[in-house]
Amino acid sequence: MPGHRNLSEQQVQFAIQNGEFGDDVISSNSRIAVIMTQDWCSQWTVIRNWVSVLNKDPDIDIYIFIYNTSAYFTAFLELKERKWGNGLIPYIRYYKDRKLAAESNYVTRDEFLDILKRS
């Protein structure tokens, strides 16, 4: 399913328990990005404006998790900041061949696509 979608509760719980997203996320397409953010983040507002345009690319799956509105906020924040070592918002993980290929924080649309192509 190309485009972007929200991570499910089960996908978030799996990541918290296992330290990484499950195969249903990281092997869902040839290029995958998981954008983790908080709804008040002004940089997220910018990303949200262009991410919907990428719905048309069948080779990209984009998952979104707005964690400050989640029941798993505290547990996820610990995973993101302690295990993954990233305290910035937004935080983006890029996957290729079921492996983490790159990480970033705020990026422009062109930077995002460049990272996906290089990954």
Image (tube, rainbow, N blue to C red):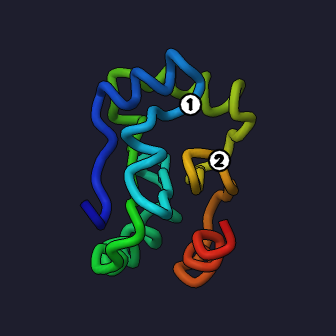
Who comes first in sequence, dot 2 or dot 1?
1
Q: Amino acid at mark 2?
A: Leu
Cα–Cα span, label 2 and label 1: 9 Å
Location of mark 1 (residue): 20
Q: In the rendered view, would you say 88 is above or below 47?
A: above
The tag on residue 100 is 2
Which residue sits at x=69%, y=34%? 84
Residue extending furthest toward the bottom: 110
Give percent across and percent down for residue 29. Answer: 41, 58
Q: In the rendered view, would you say 18 is above or below 108?
A: above
Residue 113 seen from this side: yes
Which residue sits at x=49%, y=27%? 15
Along the line of sight, the residue nearer the viewer: 107 or 62: 62
Task: Say whether residue 30 is left or right of residue 69.
Answer: right
Packing grade of label 1 (10 A; few <14, some 14-19, many >=20) is some
Describe the element under mark 1 as helix, strand or loop: loop
Q: Do callouts 2 and 1 mark residues in contact (Cβ within 8 Å)?
A: yes
Packing grade of label 2 (10 A; few <14, some 14-19, many >=20) is some
Q: Amino acid at mark 1?
A: Glu
Give percent across and percent down for residue 48. Answer: 38, 67
Which residue sits at x=39%, y=44%? 66
Which residue sits at x=61%, y=64%? 106
